Image (tube, grey):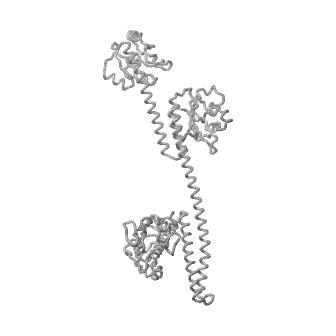
Amino acid sequence: MRVLLVEDNDDDALLICETLSETAVEIERVERLSTALERLVQGCFDAVLLDLSLPDAFGLDTIDRVLRQASGVPIVVLTGLNDEVAAVKAVERGAQDYLIKGQVDGHLLARSLRYAIQRHKAEESLKERNRELSVLRKISETILGSLDLKIVLDQILEQAMLSGSFDLGNIRLLDSSGDSLEVAVATGYRDPNNVQSHRRLSRTKEAAQSSHFSGLVFEQPCIEEHVRACTGLRTMKKEGVESFVQVPVRAEGEVLGIIQLASRTPRSFSDEEVRLLETVGNHMGIAVQRAQLYEETRRQASELERASKLQADFTAMIAHDLRSPLMNITGVAEVMIEGMFGDVTDEQKKWLERIQANGRTLVDLVSDFLDFSKLESGYVEVRKERVDFSDLIQRTIENFQFLAREKGISISDAVDLSLPAVHADPRRVDQVLSNLLSNAIKFTGEEGRIEVGTALADATEVKVWVRDNGVGIPADEIGQLFQKYQQGGNAKRSSLQGTGLGLVICKMIVEAHGGTIWVESEPGQGSTFFFSLPVNRQGATDATPA
């Protein structure tokens, strides 16, 4: 054990040396604090025995000055001042022990020095561990705080640089081929051009063997503490680097890159430092993998969106091309029924009417596909204006009265005439009402009843409903009604099956207005379809994103 004794009193110094003469303690004595500070820089000491009353220093500030010069060397105060308060303050300032001259023998003093060294090592180890945990915590926060790979790598590199007081560093990741390492981020370079001057590191056997570490960069930490004495490493030498360390960036055992940290002053790297950097590399691997997965997911989502749009455009084109000839067919059938091309028999008229009815059904189906493709493409035209619900509902009911009378169904309205002004697209709202009324008539038996009504739900919404006393809907089918191409069991058994898109289109239109749509039903008791629209006193808008 080598101890620096800082004591200006010859008698006290002699006594201390004699006291420790039978122990394994080697003493070097200085009389002034300034000399002690110089020796601490030059020599290697295990501990300092410090008097607090010196020719060039006095009191507890003496401890501070020694710690600033050599924080890694434990201090034991050995003074003639028997003061408990001073002893506590000395320990608080960083001393390991406070001993009184003349009150300790050699073995006790030697043991105190050994304990001081052990305590100091334990404290330093704890500080280092806390520092490591702080670095890893900040890196974890960085990983969780962003999915932008560039931001994450910049912040991790900054924390890694601070962890060992490095001067410059870079992170290299495998390129798209998975063969070569390219610089992703770098910091601390005097000449930015040197960043791109780094040699591309390849996994190929020939390239690996010709590199400085013979391909070990992909397997384990690599350390070079004497850059100037090495061949190669031109970029490092141009940057004035003396020592550097690099560790793999790993995720699930797979190497994704390396992190390289360098110092412009000669230094060695302890096992603890390298282990910390390996842990940083493993954390970084998780961040890289997470960010790359996010980028890949975004790319796939973009491709799916583009494919969906192409599909919607194709569907719209096909639907448009189908509707035009169908309209011609129904139009020709109508003029033939009217005798435009000569008289027709009752039998011919019956079949022409069937052609016309089936043609209109097909037109309606194609129109559903066309509407749905437009709505699903992500942009719904909603041209808003002031809507009088009483007038709108009356017109819609009139349009369906003939179809309802054929089944002996009565349609009534229950419109609240005190409703506030509502701005909506009347064509689109009529489309929703028409679809709901058509379904109600389809699934209501003869002599049934249907009610179309409106009421103020609250100060911000108007509620509209279509209620029937038809067959109703089982509870386990209600959740599927507003999904495309889904129909309830009653619809599947009906002779008037549709596309399964009507309610989906209704949902899209209502939501484009900022409203909601839902249904309440009991099998055998009928169904009530509701939708709400916001009370909007602002001006009209041309279009609303879906």
Q: Is residue 515 visible?
A: no
Q: Residue at x 37, y 74 (%)?
A: 416
The picture places residue 399, in percent across and down from the top left corner, at 48, 79
Question: Which percent across, then down, holds residue 271?
Answer: 52, 28
Residue pushed farthest right?
206
Task: Tell me: residue 143, above or below residue 378.
Answer: above
Q: Name which residue lies at 52% across and 72% down.
A: 498
Q: Is residue 252 visible?
A: yes
Horizontal placement of 176 versus 122: left or right?
right
Q: Nearer the viewer, residue 165 or 431?
A: 431
Left/right placement of residue 223 relative to residue 16 reads right
Q: Quadrant of the N terminus?
A: top left
- Front residue of this view, candidates 24 and 47: 24
Could you tell me which residue is drawn at 58 percent across and 87 percent down?
A: 347
Q: Position of residue 257 (x, y in %)?
A: 58, 39
List the single residue furthest toward the front: 493
Quarter of the image for residue 201 reads top right
Tell me where residue 476 sits by quadrant.
Answer: bottom left
Question: Residue 154 at what x, y percent from top left?
Answer: 54, 41
Label tally: 0
- 36 or 396, which lies in front? 396
Asked if residue 322 is positioned above or below residue 305 in the image, the reply reads below
Position of 503 relative to 207 (above/below): below
Judge left or right: residue 333 versus residue 399: right
